[in-house]
Amino acid sequence: MREQLTKSDVKKIEEEIEYRKLVVRKEAIEAVKEARAHGDLSENFEYHAAKKDKNKNESRIRYLERMLRTAQIVSDASKEDEVGINNTVTVYFEEDEEEQVFRLVTSIRGNSMKNLISTESPIGKAILGHKAGDRVEIKVNEEYSYFVVIRQIENTVEDENDTIRAY
């Protein structure tokens, strides 16, 4: 499946690739050279660790470049009164009688520990495009579902430091 990325996601990935190529790659090559200078490579732990780090960085670069080549670019624009990508949403869970605030993001940025919910998750798919006040059924699987009420929708802006704030 192709990853869905916003223009902001693409920019962050391009920045990571550039950093890895210009900074991390240079440091990794130097670490390998330094470890190689220590002599016998067959029992040189520093050399093997440095090679492993260098290869891990190159692998990450290839992964990110492939992701950009195959990605589907999606808009994070939404109607002001509808849930869309990068909106901060307050949801009332009827079953638990609790509210939760989270931000709807693309799948590569999803992180439930930081309340970043993917548009590919059951709740993300279900609430996308709905309005404040809507009661929405979240189908987890064929046997289980639950209902939520969308209480509030806020547009979210990211600053240069990648911190998130609502306005």
Image (cartoon, helix red, strand yellow):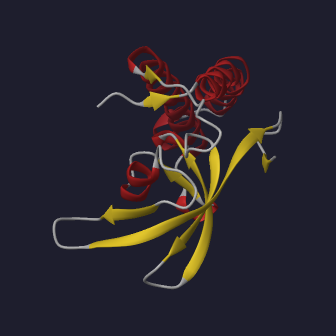
Residue 89 location, quadrant: bottom right
Residue depicted at 64% across the width and 33% down the height: 35
Against 111, residue 94 (above or below) is below
Q: Quick one: which residue is furthest to the top in this view?
A: 69
- Seen from the viewer's position, the closer of residues 140 and 43 is 140
Q: Is residue 117 left or right of residue 121?
A: right
Residue 86: where, in percent of width, then height? 62, 42
Q: Quadrant of residue 76?
A: top right
In the image: residue 92, left or right of residue 163: left
Q: Position of residue 4 (x, y in %)?
A: 44, 30
Residue 50 percent across, percent down from the top left: 59, 36
**Residue at 44% of width from left, 27% of height from top?**
63
Query: Which residue is painted at 67% across and 18% down in the image?
Result: 18
In this rendering, the answer to whether 167 lies above or below 1 is: below
Image vertical order of residue 140 relative to residue 4, above or below: below
Residue in the foreground of this view, choosing between 161 and 45: 161
Task: Determine the residue located farthest toward the front in the rendered image.
Answer: 133
Residue 11, image quadrant = top right
Is 148 on the left-hand or right-hand side of 90?
A: left
Farthest bottom residue in view: 96
Q: Is residue 67 left or right of residue 61?
A: left
Residue placed most toward the observer, 156 or 97: 97
Q: Nearer the viewer, residue 72 or 148?
A: 148
User: Residue 116 at x, y = what percent?
Assistant: 58, 54
Q: Where, quadrant-wise, is the N terminus in this rendering?
A: top left
Count of marks placed on residues: 0
Q: Residue, x 48% and y 19% (percent of image)?
A: 68
